Image: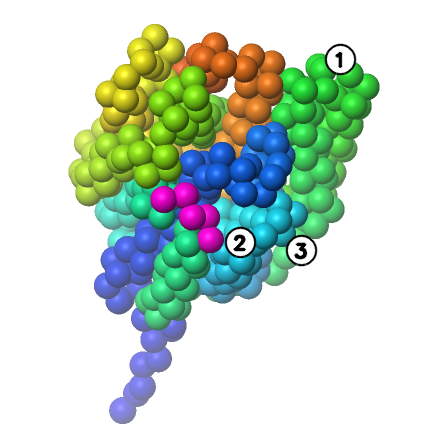
Amino acid sequence: MATVVVPAARETLKRNPWPAVVALSVAASIAAMQNTAVVPLLPVLQRELNTSLTAVSWTLTVSLLVGAVSTPLLSRFGDMYGRRRMILGALAFLVAGSVMAAMATSLPWLIVARVLQGSVAALVPLSIGVVRDALPRAQFATGVGVLSATMGFGSGGGMILAGLADGDFHLVFWIIGGFSLAAGIVVAFLVRDAAPPVKGRPDLFGAALLAAWLVALLLGISEGGSWGWTSPGVLGLFGAAVVLAAGWVAVELKVAEPLVDMAMLVHRGTVGATVSSMLLGFSFFTLLTGMSSFAQAPVGFSATTLQVGLYLLPSTLFMLVISLFAGRLMRRLPAASMVATGSLVTGLAALWLIFENDSPWHLYAASSLMGVGLGVGYAALGTMAVEHVDQGKTALASGVNALVRIVGGSTAGAVIAAILAARPGAGGYQWVFGAAAGAGVLAALFAAGFGYLNRGAVTGPVTGPVTGPSAR
């Protein structure tokens, strides 16, 4: 009697994939939570660590910056050594960084901890790759929508966590560390790689250049208000950023296996998603950080971190509700339309605070609008990034999209620090909200235009997974 041997990949695909999708979604929400939990803690960290607002803002910026570098790098490692292994490695870094942050007694110590935590940003594109390989053909968009929407819920949850901890940053990071450890254990049991690894060589030099020019750019922006925009230091940083960025582009165009595919950045099927993601990421973090800082400032409401968490509770609740219906929304509405709508609503939330900001109820209203906007927009970003590219390039497209979204978010802290240094007081916050509103509206315009130009031209795996080396 003949014996039939079933390949491991096919056995994986025969399992119910949804427990793994849920596990990855929870892990993605924790990855988002570790960033936003820091936002309402910035005034607390400034006071307890005896440092300036510009300096302490790097506890947020450096995590986003590391995420921008680690996202394409760990995505490539995932292709080479397995996505599951890289996901577990990123979660291990998050646990280690959380424990270190919980024990931090100085700013340098905390920044090193935040560097470790920042690597978990790569979890999102890695998870999209796993979801693409695991889900049946008709459920791919639903899976990506759930993954993206719960990431938005985690972003709001971080603010709530900081509020419930009443500003105790040690407790916040202990809780995040515990959540991360639990998520890692569940992922280890439920998630499997369905596609075999491929050979390759990581672009370490490209990663170093990317980090270098981003640091120079963000440091120049954050210090422009205090050093002077025409000071030798700031001009030198901007000049270094330009030179390093040019060198990075040259390397990426020549290397056989680049960290970031330059062609993918300007590909007709992705350029709208790329620009929209970067602008929405900037709008989100600028609005979130601006609301938290304004609420706690004397020119605002002198709120505690618990009160800030309550002000932002509506955004978390709306993100949670929308995440429950993300699958239905993705089946009925074009991804570009959802991103455009979500970006516009996020921009309107910021616009509201420019004109109405003298009552806590105005913060509740803006928080509600932000939750709706991010819930709808984030649910569709993953699909919008991949639905108009060849099936074999979906992992690459989702990695590039995650990278630019993180780059957009990482500039928010530097821009806010520069604005408030140049315009202290209530007027400065109006400029902050204006920047968030402008970015949200622009993101909506790019998404709408992208959807119009690519209408009816779906070529990506919006209806099914891709397996095998060609999927890489």
- Residue 336 appears in the figure: no
Q: Residue at x 28, y 17 (%)?
A: 359
Q: Quadrant of residue 361?
A: top left
Give me the disc on residue 230: 1
Please state which amino acid type lies under the numbered disc 2.
Ala
Q: Which badge, 1 or 2, comes first in the chain's sequence?
A: 2
Magenta segment, prevailing SS (helix, strand or loop): loop
Q: Position of residue 2 (x, y in %)?
A: 30, 87
Q: Secondary structure at mark 1?
A: loop
Q: CA distance from mark 1 to mark 3?
A: 41 Å
Q: Which badge, 1 or 3, comes first in the chain's sequence?
A: 3
Q: Position of residue 370 (x, y in %)?
A: 31, 26
Please state which amino acid type lies under the numbered disc 3.
Arg
Question: Neighbour class for label 2 at 10 Å: few (<14), some, many (≥20)?
Answer: many
Q: Position of residue 42 (x, y in %)?
A: 50, 36
Please state which amino acid type lies under the numbered disc 1.
Thr
Give me the disc on residue 201: 3
| Mark closer to the observer (1, 2) | 2
Residues marked 1 and 2 touching at CB (< 8 Å)? no
Q: CA distance from mark 1 to mark 2?
A: 36 Å
| Mark closer to the observer (3, 2) | 2
Question: Neighbour class for label 3 at 10 Å: few (<14), some, many (≥20)?
Answer: few
Stretch of the chain drawn in magenta: 166-170
Residue closest to the eye, 283 or 336: 283
Q: Secondary structure at mark 3?
A: loop
| Total count of labels | 3
Residue under label 2: 101
